Image (cartoon, rainbow, N blue to C red):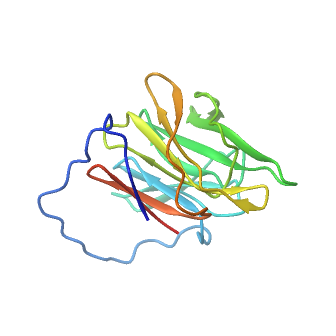
Amino acid sequence: LATAVPHAIPPVVKPRKLTVQCHRKKTAPCGMIRGSATTDGRFAYFTPRYSTSVYQYECSTEKWEELPSCPYQNSGLVIADRELTAVGGWGGESRYTNKLYTLRQRKWVEKYPPMNTARSDTAVVSTSDGEYLIVIGGLLVFDWTATVELFQVKSRRWYQLTDLPQPLTFPSATICGDQLNVIG
């Protein structure tokens, strides 16, 4: 599935040459099935499904560190304004959240206004310049959602984009050029 990203979003810069090499790394502190992951270039961040645990992996030293627990399970992780941010999530007993929490000084704080649709198990991506976040699909009260929302970081405003052709939960997403690519 692919949907166009609004023209206001600058294209992602493509690398001239990309060499992919696979190497065994230190084992993760726990299983990471169906979780969320993001990177800021220096660190990779992971949260496993059905958990509020968040792990930081330092790429250069191959060291793992457990960070303070996220306020909700099944949140989508993204780097927003150079800070780790958890988007949405599930609090048990059909309690889904539309809140965004940013990790500051080892505490999760509400830095941004909530998105329109409360959900968990969503894909969330940031544009290469960090100006926009896009939240795609997810789980909402035991049903999948096709909702796509765009957040403009500087203006702190949410915009509803065209829904996906079909609802998705546990999707993965990337931005390539002016295309938002979603699979799930």
Foreground residue among 168 and 39: 168
Q: Quadrant of the N terminus?
A: bottom left
Q: Which residue is depicted at the point 37% across and 37% down? A: 130
In the shown orientation, is residue 59 left or right of residue 55?
left
Q: Position of residue 46 (x, y in %)?
A: 54, 58
List the single residue furthest toward the left.
16
Q: Which residue is depicted at the point 70% across and 44% down? A: 118
Foreground residue among 71 and 2: 2
Q: Which residue is depicted at the point 74% across and 61% down? A: 143
Residue 133 vs 60, above or below: the answer is above
Q: Position of residue 76 (x, y in %)?
A: 58, 52
List the single residue furthest toward the top.
155
Foreground residue among 160 and 124: 160
Residue 123 vs 32, above or below: the answer is above
In the shown orientation, is residue 177 left or right of residue 155?
left
| Number of numbered discs visible in the structure rendering | 0
Foreground residue among 79 and 122: 122
Q: Position of residue 168 (x, y in %)?
A: 59, 63
Q: Mark yes or no: residue 106 visible.
A: no
Q: Mark yes or no: residue 155 visible.
A: yes
Q: Quadrant of residue 107?
A: top right
Q: Position of residue 176 (x, y in %)?
A: 29, 55
List the single residue furthest toward the right.
93
